[in-house]
Image: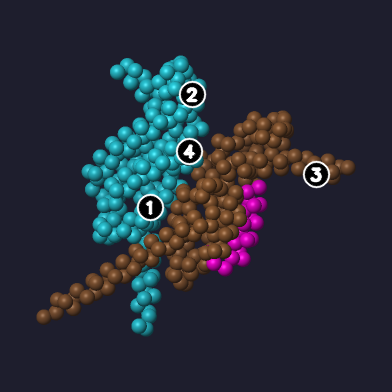
Amino acid sequence: MEKHKNLSVWTEEGYSLFSKEGLDGIQVERLARILGLNKSGFYHYFGDLEGFCIELISLHKKKVSDFLKEVGETPKLDPDYLYLLIKYSETVMFQVQLTRSQNPVFYAASEWVDQKVDIAVRRLWNDFMEVADNADATFRYYAIVRDMFYTRISYQNLNYTFLHNLVWDAKVIMDEIGERRQFETDKSPY
Amino acid sequence: MLSQFFMEKSKNSSVWIEAGYNLFAEEGIEGIQVERLARILQLNKSGFYHYFGDIDGYCEELIKLHKRKADGYLADLSTVKSIDPDYLMGLVRHKVSCMFHLQLIRSKDKPLFYKTAEEIDQHEGDLIGALWSDYLGIHDHPALALRYFNIVRDMLYARLSFKNFDYENLRNLMAEAKAVMQQITENDAAAVADDSLHPLNELP
């Protein structure tokens, strides 16, 4: 248990650093300095940086699982799911860093997470967009809005107001385009 | 002699800037390290500090270069006749600048970076609005189409990398954005049509 506790001290700090700075933030000497520990401990537990990153990804999947359990109990996208994202800020930002990574192992991990979260969020999103649960196109729209979120989000703006405006803008745009197209259809003489 | 001296000096500072521009496009601000630049260029670090003072001064020059390149991109954009293929091919032609731009957007802790990106995005939107609304089939409503374009552009920023920044991938991503919008709004129209039949069904 002592060993696990010491190992997790490294991975928790590394997780936090990665969520803020990506892979460039992960340097053994820097981690050791922050933790006040000897670098040899790092090499003992992880072997090298690659081994450490594998542990970070495992930790991320575990945190995502905890997140998904709570999503299952979340009644509504706004405000409940949005507040859940804020509660899991560090996990969200770790995921954002993974999506931006050129490293194929990191990118594959981000896709794994997206697939799991997509399934869990589908119900909430389609309910928010006021469409039937099997509305495939609306859920493909979620993927586009999610990617916009990945581009725009940062620790600085990961707050309720920003998230609320983001999802409502996305909904309103689609509603207004729909009204516009309905208007043009109605104008047709046929 | 004097003009030649100044030209040599400009040439040397621009060598640092061009190298940094490409590095930033690939890796963002983390890629910008004086020692690394000096090693790549095989120049002395003292040259960097002489021309730019520090990293902040250097980044200001990178931004100036990006604005000049963006002017070229926007000038190109003003001549395009379609989203697909003209606009998309334009993005591919300006691939490095687009990737540099993407890194600016990601730099949320540096107002100079993301505000520069926002300004350029605004200009791009102004130029592209009518074409985009035609592409989507939302005619005569470019302001609304542009709001969707802003979302789709952010989606592109999330998905694009140097490896997949090609016409085919861009075309597929744009086509998906268009198809999703069309299908959702067709579903909405069908739902409205269904609703309008119900009162007739209830007549005695």
In the rendered structure, which amino acid carries the disc numbered 1? Ala
Residue A69, given in percent of the width and then of the height, sits at: 25, 40
Q: Does label 2 or label 4 sit earlier along the sequence? A: 2
The residue labelled by disc 3 is B7
Chain B's colour is brown
Q: Does label 1 or label 4 sit earlier along the sequence? A: 4
Q: Chain of mark 2?
A: A
Q: How is the image coloured?
A: by chain
> What SS does tag 3 mark?
helix
Residue lying furthest left: B204
Asked if disc 2 and disc 4 are in contact, CB closer than 8 Å, the reply is no
Residue B141, given in percent of the width and then of the height, sits at: 46, 69
Quadrant of the image containing the C terminus of chain A: bottom left
The residue labelled by disc 4 is A103
Quadrant of the image containing the N terminus of chain A: top left
Extent of the magenta region: B65-83
Instruction: Using the rendered image of the protein, determine whether residue B160 is visible from the camera's viewpoint.
Output: yes
Q: Nearer the viewer, mark 1 or mark 4?
A: 4
Number of other residues with Cα within 10 Å of mark 1, as a class: few under 14, some 14 to 19, many 20 or more: some
Q: Nearer the viewer, mark 2 or mark 3?
A: 2
The residue labelled by disc 2 is A28
Q: Is residue B76 magenta?
A: yes
In the rendered structure, which amino acid carries the disc numbered 3? Met
Foreground: B93 or B20? B93
Residue lying furthest bottom: A189
Please tell me the numbered disc located at residue B128. none
How far, Cα to Cα, is label 1 from label 4?
Answer: 22 Å
Chain that is coloured cyan in the picture: A
Number of other residues with Cα within 10 Å of mark 3, as a class: few under 14, some 14 to 19, many 20 or more: few
Residue lying furthest right: B1
Residue B48, given in percent of the width and then of the height, sits at: 70, 34
